[in-house]
Image: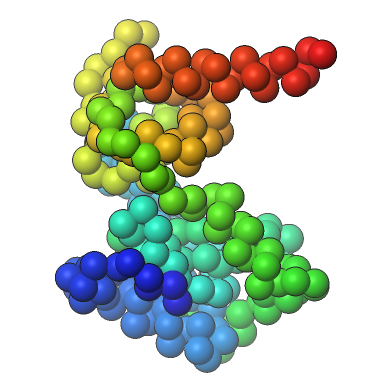
Amino acid sequence: LELANVPREVKRGTPGVKLAIEQLLRAIACGCKVRFRYVWTDDSGREVPKHPEGTAPVSPYTLIWRRDRFFLIGNYAPDSGLSYYRLDRIRGLELLPDERALPLEAIFPQNAGQKLREFVAKNIYERKGPEVRLGLRVAPGHADDLRDSFGGDVRFLPGDGGSLEAFVTVTAGEGLYRWLLHHAGQVTVIKPESVRTEFVRRLRAVLEDYTE
């Protein structure tokens, strides 16, 4: 469990997150699966189940602290690889003591620990850099991507053609540009001009690599 740089008041946790941490640590220690409901936010801002039929049993491997939040790293099917879940979005968590967790080595027969660290670095990266007030135009159906990445501080306003405009304070570092590249086509930077200019520069550099 990676708890470096977690503020003391967050380590104590809100009751729901604290209970989830305790339950997940027990599940990891005993090597059993867990089941829970995972919620997301639709374009109207309502909290709804991500999978109305319920989440498949998950093999839990570790908890990490990133972006001021706790995340569970796990696997829900032998051929699905790793997935991550924000603890504050988990509801109705239950341990399944009769269902053994899939060993991490079954997914990565070699260098399993290193592969897990690489997954975390690629998917739940730290954001460092100067703070900016980011404005984005968001395609329909993708509002939850912002809430999942930036939390509940995102402010949404109606945009043109069914889109939304989103505003949130972020750090303009390498992690932000990687996130923007990953979501290119779903979000468009409105402001600040410094972030828009730098992102366009990076996109052009990528394009040049494929047109030479």
Where's residue 59, x and y in %?
Answer: 57, 73
What's the residue at 49%, 52% (across, down)?
A: 124
Residue nearer the viewer, 97 or 158: 158
Residue nearer the viewer, 5 or 68: 5
Quadrant of the drawing holding the N terminus: bottom left
Q: Left or right? Give the position of 58 relative to 7.
A: right
What's the residue at 75%, 71% (across, down)?
A: 111
Where's residue 98, x and y in %?
Answer: 56, 89
What's the residue at 44%, 51% (across, down)?
A: 126
Q: Quadrant of residue 79?
A: bottom right
Q: Quadrant of residue 119?
A: bottom right
196 to 76, vertically: above or below: above
What's the residue at 32%, 31% (across, down)?
A: 43
Q: In this figure, which colouring scheme has been used for the structure?
A: rainbow
Where's residue 63, x and y in %?
Answer: 45, 71
Task: Give the total number of marks visible in the rendering.
Answer: 0
Where's residue 158, x and y in %?
Answer: 25, 17
169 to 209, vertically: above or below: below
Residue nearer the viewer, 26 or 98: 26
13 to 124, vertically: above or below: below
Residue 100 in sight: yes
198 to 71, vertically: above or below: above
Quadrant of the drawing holding the C terminus: top right
